[in-house]
Amino acid sequence: MTKSLVTTLACLLHLALCHTIGADDSANLSKTQLQKLRLGTSSAQVELREASDSATFIITGLSNLDRLQKLPLDDLQKTMVVRVHQPGFANNLPSLLGTHSVTETELRFTSRFPLSPSAQYRVELAQDLVTGPYHELTVVFSSLPKKRMPAATVFAVYPSADVLPENLLKFYIYFSAPMSRGEAYERIHLIHDGAEVESPFLELGEELWDAEQKRFTLFVHPGRIKRGLKPREDSGTPMTEGKEYTLRIDAEWLGADRKPLATLFEKKFRVAGADAQQPDSKQWKIGLPKANSKQPVTLTFDEPLDHAMLSRVISVRGASNALLVGSVSVTAHETVWSFEPIEAWMPGTYSIALATNLEDLVGNSLARPFETKELDVESRLNMATEIAIVFNIQ
């Protein structure tokens, strides 16, 4: 086996394109920079390609790419790591989120988000997966200024209504641009009468973000919602019927570009009584489109439902159970779901398929109430996972 070699590249990166982007330039125009380095007796090339929405680090000239191609993904991720570089912190800082790949000619890492213009980045390349001493080589990449992007904003919070149930289970917070991880619970506050409510949220070790890191899921502490649990008996519910609250999001929260939010965000709401009832699909109303049109089919619910799930667990099917392609919208404070097909409706029979785990605002699903005790294995196996609402277009 060849001697283990770990090469550290300290890359001074200003998030930029080859020139300032004008109005007529492509949004994905990229800048390429090259540096060469010695790896033992061979010469490798390090390439950095920066685009407006990501950055790709490419290593060519490695002698063991055929072996890297056979590695499982978990091991491949260890061969090349990119971190924010801060002298003295060594490997304590987390690696960037992104995707690794390897071909017959190159090893590459593509970041999920653009690089920050105010940070340095370190690429750690392990030629072998054997721990060994560090051999440091510093390469500086310089960049030209880039068109400044606006700071991220909070553009929506769900549930969207201004009256929410006392046993509300979660909020969804949507941002206009990717956000940083690790500070969510410091930046979100529940305020009542000018004072912060103590420990209202479930603080998870791994923050709950969507793939783009633009939607954060914030759970109200379930132990303070569900009856009979000690946190509720000791501290009561975080929100009380008849009172008014404010969900406040600090402007200091940093985006993935390390810039703070453009402004403070507040959602004010009043609290209604607890909701113990499951959604009842028999009470839902369906709005039918006309044949040979692209009008939407709609469902109007008996109560507001979970915003994110409405976009994920409902589908429309046609002849032979074929899945229809189209766009979904959720309106009227999450009480109306609409599906607009890409192709016009033909006369015939269709169905709207709904997963039975679809929930309302407090965790009551089509399958069972939130307060139900954990089901045994046999009950879970016998539980329907989907229901269908059939409709005809003449």
Image: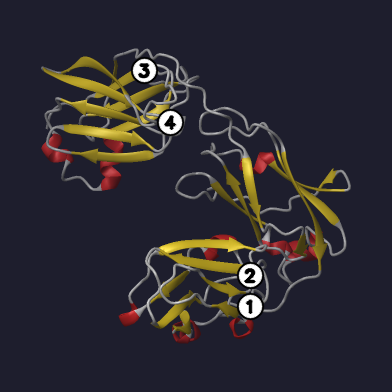
Q: Name the residue located 32 percent from the left edge and 19 percent from the top edge.
A: 9
Image disc number at residue 214: none
Residue at the spot of label 1 = 279
> Of circles 3 and 4, which is in front?
4
Q: Name the residue located 16 percent from the left edge and 42 percent from the top edge.
A: 69
Residue at the spot of label 4 = 114
Q: Are marks 1 and 2 in contact (CB under 8 Å)?
A: yes
Q: Toward which corner of the image does residue 141 lie, by quadrant?
A: top left
Q: CA distance from mark 3 to mark 2?
A: 49 Å
Q: Secondary structure at mark 2?
A: loop
Residue at the spot of label 3 = 10
Would residue 316 appear left or right of 164 to someone viewing this image? left
Mark 2 or mark 4, which is nearer the start of the sequence?
4
Mark 3 or mark 1, which is nearer the start of the sequence?
3
* Mark 4, other Cα within 10 Å: few <14 / some 14–19 / many ≥20: some
Q: Position of residue 171 (x, y in %)?
A: 65, 55
Residue at the spot of label 2 = 360
Q: CA distance from mark 1 to mark 3?
A: 55 Å
Would residue 141 appear left or right of 36 to someone viewing this image? right
Going by the numbered disc 2, the residue's amino acid type is: Asp
Q: Are marks 1 and 4 in contact (CB under 8 Å)?
A: no
Mark 2 or mark 3, which is nearer the start of the sequence?
3
Q: Camera-side residue: 236 or 268?
A: 268
Q: Is residue 133 visible?
A: no
> Of circles 3 and 2, which is in front?
2
Q: Is the residue 61 above or below the residue 334 in the image?
A: above
Q: Position of residue 17 (x, y in %)?
A: 38, 21
Mark 4 or mark 1, which is nearer the start of the sequence?
4
Going by the numbered disc 1, the residue's amino acid type is: Pro
Q: CA distance from mark 1 to mark 2?
A: 7 Å
